């Protein structure tokens, strides 16, 4: 299905512009009045304002901050200077204290000004990212503005010098307050290192670790050598014991020495000295140490005494033969025997040999005893050395931490000392970091009021307020005001745009000749060239394209609310279609407020309700509509329940019969919102035409209509916009009026021609 709107199409942008222009032209006097009033107020305010002059001075501010540069590996390589924001300095410079100091230095006649008045007219701001402050002052007297800025510049430079010196002084005080605590930390760290060395008797844990490791290796080597010697002596002793056997003389020497208390006491003393000497050697001490040397001498002296005692008991010869005490090996010779035992001095040669073997065995036994005692001492010394060696890592960690603490404390203390000296030198050499970069000037032109700028702003504000005032009523009014708005709200094709009728006074004076008045509408019976009639003819032509091969014959015309002109559109559309040679039936389906019969002053005693409720054929109920091709079916008597009749099977049969008998069947129904009459018929007709009255229906009501039509699943052909005038979508209205006003002038000059004589539109339609 293709719908062809009767009115010319416009682009969306052009329509919006025309709509805005229409609203603005409609309320042009209001817009112009507001614009002129606003502009006049601004102009008067500008004219009566007191001129104000502004002077300024530029002050260079050295406010750089040292930002440390740290490398990725954490190293410190220096610092870079950056300019910080000057918000704090600006607030200080605008403070009452500094401003009051400056005002005291003002020369007459400018002295005595209040601080509040000066601060209100004073403005200070930073120029971009640079370290420059722009200080401006506004005053009605140009010379006073310059004088105030001059004294303010001097005060600001003085303030910067005092502030810089104050910072150095405060820094020196701060560092001097920190020095005692830094000195105490350094002393504590030194004491901790000294106490560590004294407690553990270790000057340096690293060197001590090397000595302990060397001693541990020496002890291990001595133990291994001694174990080999003991093994060899034990083997020799076993051989001698096997040779000597169990003879009594074998144990003679052993018995003699084992029963000598002096000898046994010397052996015990020697063992103790040997164990103590081995322990010192395992701890890393050498024979050169005085303590170790004395211990070694005592051990050797005990060995000599032991040898002397053995000689005194056994005799020098026997001791020499047995090798007793040779090489430092000492043991207890002999075993316990009876007190009365004695040595057989005068034994034979065999006994002498056996005694010699026994003496050697006793010497080896003594040597083995001394070696085993020495081995035990070495092993004890090895255990002590291993324990000390295991404690070394912890000692190294503690010593390293103490050393690090000592270094940090020393570095911090030295840094404080150096910084104090540096600050004292800097304080002595300090100069003002600020200076006046550009002195204030004497202003010659006022900065306020800005006449041209104010007038321009007043003009723009007046125009905007005037235009806004012109559009405010339309924004608050929800009524549909134009063709394009109706198209946009419904999303349906535009079938026609119908203007209001004209020449109402003439129609009222001669209704029988030209037609009948219905409200403010003129219903004509004859062919006229009015814009209203031509719009209906354009609508009639649009109906030809609703379906192929005249498939659309039954049309239902409805509206959103009453008074949108749907009944008038229905009747005049039928009249136009009849003029085009189409056989048309107009059915008045509005059984609540019928109006079709009044257009031709017809009786309404029988009609649609009669055809549905009785067996009377509908052909006996139709009436002529003033044209041979136009037939009217009025509502007839109003039933108590119109919906029951319209929704009956008989109504569906009648529509089908009418479809076969006529080219077009136009059914006029009540408004679709609030009444179910039209809703019960929309599914029985080919298509529905929605009449939208300009400035009658509203956007919300129109949205409700679309919901009802969508839920009814009917086919909507499009919309017919009614009640157009020159104030809403005027270009539709002007298409008709401009052309026919020109034809009216031609007719008055004798040049008018009747379109019937040349066929005109009717002839084209029939062809």
Image: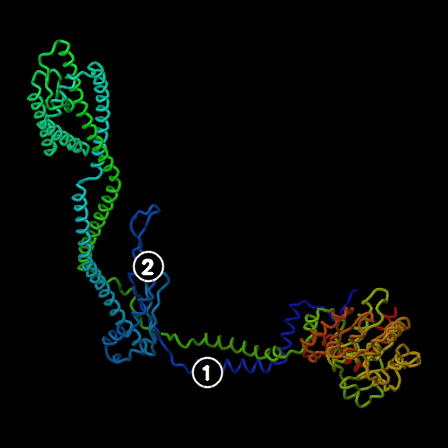
Q: Earlier in the sequence, mark 2 or mark 1?
A: 1
Contact between marks 2 and 1 (CB within 8 A): the answer is no
Which is nearer the eye, 366 or 165? Answer: 366
- Give the residue at mark 1: 44
Which picture quadrant has residue 660? bottom right
**Which residue in the protein does label 2 denote?**
83
Above/below status of 468 relative to 72:
below
| Rendered-image quadrant of the C terminus | bottom right
Q: Position of residue 113 (x, y in %)?
A: 28, 80
Question: Eyeballing the image, is 65 above or below 200?
Answer: below
Question: Which secondary structure lies at badge 1?
Answer: helix
Residue 175 at least partly seen = yes
Q: Give the percent coordinates (x, y) of residue 669.
A: 80, 78
Q: 120 or 276, which is in the foreground?
A: 276
Question: Dot 2: what SS?
Answer: strand
In the image, residue 128 sits, relative to residue 520, either above or below, namely above
In the depicted view, which residue is nearer to us: 255 or 677?
255
| Foreground residue among 759 and 525 | 525
- Reply above or below: 60 against 628: above
Residue 735: quarter of image: bottom right
């Amino acid at each position: 299905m293709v719908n062809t709107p009767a009115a010319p199409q416009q682009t969306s942008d052009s329509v919006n512009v025309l709509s805005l222009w229409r609203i603005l032209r409609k309320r042009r006097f209001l817009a112009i009045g507001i614009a002129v009033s606003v502009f006049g107020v601004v102009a008067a305010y500008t004219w009566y304002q007191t001129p104000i002059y502004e002077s300024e001075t530029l002050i260079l501010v050295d406010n750089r901050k040292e930002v440390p540069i740290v490398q990725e590996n954490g190293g410190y390589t220096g610092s870079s200077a950056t300019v910080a924001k000057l918000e704090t300095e600006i607030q200080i410079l605008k403070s009452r204290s500094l401003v009051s100091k400056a005002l005291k230095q003002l020369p007459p006649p400018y002295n005595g000004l209040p601080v509040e008045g000066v601060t209100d007219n004073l403005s200070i701001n930073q120029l971009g990212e640079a370290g420059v402050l722009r200080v401006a002052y506004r005053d009605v007297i140009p010379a006073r503005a310059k004088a105030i800025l001059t004294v303010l510049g001097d005060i600001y430079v003085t303030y910067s010098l005092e502030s810089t010196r104050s910072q150095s002084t405060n820094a020196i005080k701060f560092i001097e307050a920190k020095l005692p605590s830094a000195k105490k930390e350094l002393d504590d760290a030194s004491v901790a290192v000294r106490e560590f060395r004294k407690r553990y008797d270790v000057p340096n844990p690293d060197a001590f670790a090397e000595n302990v490791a060397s001693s541990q290796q020496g002890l291990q080597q001595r133990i291994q050598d001694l174990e080999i010697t003991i093994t060899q002596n034990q083997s020799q002793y076993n051989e001698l014991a096997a040779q000597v056997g169990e003879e009594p003389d074998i144990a003679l020497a052993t018995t003699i020495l084992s029963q000598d208390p002096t000898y046994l006491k010397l052996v015990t003393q020697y063992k103790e000295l040997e164990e103590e000497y081995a322990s010192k050697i395992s701890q890393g001490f050498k024979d050169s140490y005085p303590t170790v040397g004395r211990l070694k001498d005592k051990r050797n002296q005990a060995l000599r005494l032991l040898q002397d005692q053995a000689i005194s008991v056994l005799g020098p010869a026997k001791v020499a033969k047995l090798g007793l005490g040779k090489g430092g090996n000492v043991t207890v010779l002999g075993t316990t025997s009876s007190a009365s035992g004695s040595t057989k001095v005068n034994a034979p040669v065999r006994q002498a040999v056996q005694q010699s073997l026994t003496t050697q065995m006793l010497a080896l036994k003594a040597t083995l005893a001394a070696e085993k005692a020495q081995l035990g001492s070495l092993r004890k010394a090895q255990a002590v050395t291993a324990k000390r060696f295991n404690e070394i890592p912890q000692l190294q960690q503690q010593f390293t931490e103490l050393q690090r603490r000592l270094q940090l404390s020393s570095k911090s203390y030295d840094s404080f000392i150096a910084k104090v000296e540096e600050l004292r030198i800097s304080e002595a050499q300090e100069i003002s970091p600020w200076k006046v970069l550009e002195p204030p000037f004497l202003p010659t032109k006022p900065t306020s009021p800005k006449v041209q700028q104010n007038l321009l702003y007043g003009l723009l504000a007046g125009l905007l307020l005037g235009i806004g005032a012109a559009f405010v009523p339309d924004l608050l009014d929800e009524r549909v005001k134009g063709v394009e708005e109706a198209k946009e709200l419904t999303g349906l094709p535009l079938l026609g745009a119908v203007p209001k009728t004209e020449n109402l006074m003439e129609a009222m004076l001669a209704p029988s000749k030209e037609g009948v008045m219905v409200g403010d509408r003129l219903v004509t019976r004859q062919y006229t060239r009015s814009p209203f009639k031509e719009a209906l003819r354009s609508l009639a032509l649009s109906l030809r394209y609703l379906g192929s091969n005249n498939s659309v014959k039954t049309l239902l015309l409805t509206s959103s609310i009453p008074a949108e002109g749907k009944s008038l559109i229905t009747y005049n559309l039928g009249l136009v279609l009849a003029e085009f040679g189409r056989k048309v039936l107009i059915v008045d389906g509005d059984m609540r407020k019928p109006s079709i019969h009044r257009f031709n002053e017809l009786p309404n005693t029988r009609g649609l309700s009669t055809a549905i409720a009785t067996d009377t054929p509908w052909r006996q109920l139709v009436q002529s509509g003033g044209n041979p091709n136009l037939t009217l079916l009025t509502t007839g008597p109003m039933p108590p329940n119109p919906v029951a009749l319209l929704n009956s099977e008989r109504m569906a049969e009648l529509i089908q019969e009418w479809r076969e008998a006529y080219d077009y069947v136009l059914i006029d129904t009540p408004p679709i919102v609030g009444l179910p009459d039209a809703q019960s018929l929309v599914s029985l007709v080919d298509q529905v035409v929605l009449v939208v009255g300009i400035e009658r229906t509203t956007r919300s009501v129109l949205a409700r209509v679309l919901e009802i039509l969508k839920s009814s699943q009917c086919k909507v052909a499009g919309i017919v916009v009614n009640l157009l005038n020159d104030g809403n979508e005027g270009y539709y209205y002007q298409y008709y009026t401009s052309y026919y006003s020109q034809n009216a002038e031609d007719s008055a000059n004798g040049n008018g021609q009747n379109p019937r004589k040349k066929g005109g539109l009717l002839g084209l339609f029939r062809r």
